[in-house]
Image: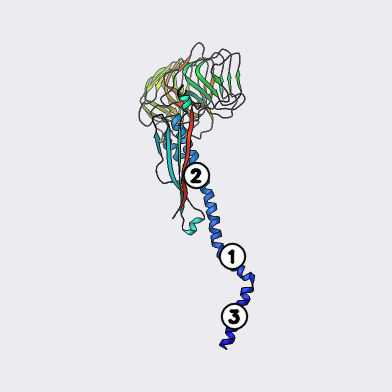
Amino acid sequence: MHERWTIKTLGLLGHFKRDRKGSISLYFAFALLPILSMMGLALDYGRLINARSAAQTAMDNAVLTAVISPGADAASMFRGSMSQSGITLTSAPTFTTNANGGVTGAASGLLSTAIMNVLGFKAMKFSVRATAGISTSTATTRTPNKVCILVLDPNAAQALLVNGNFNVAAPTCEIDVASTGSPAAIFNSGDNINVQNVCVQGSTVIQNSVTVTNLATNCATASDPFKRNMPAVAVASCTVSNLNYSGSNSLSPGVYCGNFNFNGSGALNLQPGLYVFSGAHWNLNSGWTVSGTGVTFYFADNSSYIQINSGVTVNISAPTSGTYANILMYEPGGLSNSAFTINAASGQTMSGLIYLPSRNLTFNSGSTLSSESLTLVLNQLILNSNSPGTWRIAPAALSVSSASYATMTTTTKSGSPALTQ
């Protein structure tokens, strides 16, 4: 009995050995696990490559911005970009400035695995590094221009429109127009634009019976260095709502809501601090004088603005220290485009950064402006005749450097990807 069982068993084993179907199934079962592991690794590695590429781009942009605008917060800009990528930073990004004004940034992070997690590998780590600086060949001959007016709309026709007889005296300033529309900018008869340079991204500019000196088309315009670097404001409940003013008035910082009319002639003194406009509109009529030192206006939505009408004199300046240092007017990102108008004011002295990237700002006939420290960043800009007056402006402390002279000198990626448990 035992002998027969042994012989029969050996016969079955021999038959199984000769049965190729059984051996293939057995081999496939053994090979399935490493095949699936390799597929999972490939999928996760592809995700990591994309995430690391996004992080490298964010780091490149951050160090370039830090060179173009030394006052910008490169670390906040980098972290803001990473908040959309699913990456967890393992340490705070670092940025160091060398003796020549170049900036080096470095960061490391983790990306959670999607497939390899089942094998105990929870994440993949990597690091990025980039250096930006002023091109040596140009830095030896001249320093970067300061952009006093940056028009951001990338597609609009007439993103910059300068109507006849407008005078600008800003010999230390550059005007940059990012539009590639046709035409991107128009200058009309009688304009006198005395600036260091006019740089237009597009190829088409109309000059009607006027020649703008130092005008360049197909030009690399400055990027927006403030896009992710402006102080956040938590808008509280209204402090003041819907009032009419006349005579002499002194206003304090707070949250202003609704409509405010400044009628007749009067004097408005603004105490230092932050003025938040939440669905607010100030209408300053002829005969008013507005003054304030160390003030910042924050427009929380696109329905909030200040209307400066004919015959108004304005003398306002931004703080020189603190959270809102050198910021005169600004708004949050992501607002839909809207109009903002300053009419024929009798005289304006404004100092600081005016950062209104969603606004199409119009300075109407007769408007004059004088400032030793002003940077305008807008969506679109219309300058109507100010003859016989003249705009006289110079770069603000929060300035924008011309992209023509700020270039990436080196960009390096470091830290090979590695799985972590």
Where residue 396 appears, as percent x and y from the top left, is: 42, 23
SS at mark 2 in the image: helix
Q: Is residue 411 left or right of residue 318?
A: right
Residue kind at label 1, given as amino acid type: Phe
Please say whether residue 414 is visible from this viewpoint: yes
Residue kind at label 2, given as amino acid type: Arg
Instruction: Kindly report which numbered mark, 1 or 2, lies closer to the viewer in this rendering.
Output: 1
The C terminus appears in which quarter of the rendering? bottom left
Q: Residue extending furthest bottom?
A: 1
Residue denoted by label 2: 52
Which picture quadrant has residue 373?
top left
Residue kind at label 3, given as amino acid type: Leu
Which tag, 1 or 2, sits closer to the chain's start?
1
Q: Nearer the viewer, residue 208 or 2?
A: 2
Residue denoted by label 3: 10
Which tag, 1 or 3, sits closer to the chain's start?
3
SS at mark 1 in the image: helix
Q: Nearer the viewer, residue 165 or 208?
A: 208
Where residue 14 appears, as percent x and y from the top left, is: 61, 77
Which picture quadrant has residue 143?
top left
Residue denoted by label 1: 28
Q: Nearer the viewer, residue 150 or 65?
A: 65
Instruction: Kindly report which numbered mark, 2 or 3, lies closer to the viewer in this rendering.
Output: 3
The N terminus appears in which quarter of the rendering? bottom right
Q: Nearer the viewer, residue 357 or 302?
A: 357
Please say whether residue 269 is visible from this viewpoint: no
- At 57% from the left and 87% from the top, the residue drawn is 3
C-alpha span from label 1 to label 3: 25 Å
SS at mark 3 in the image: helix
Do the residues bearing badges 1 and 2 touch, measured as CB atoms within 8 Å? no
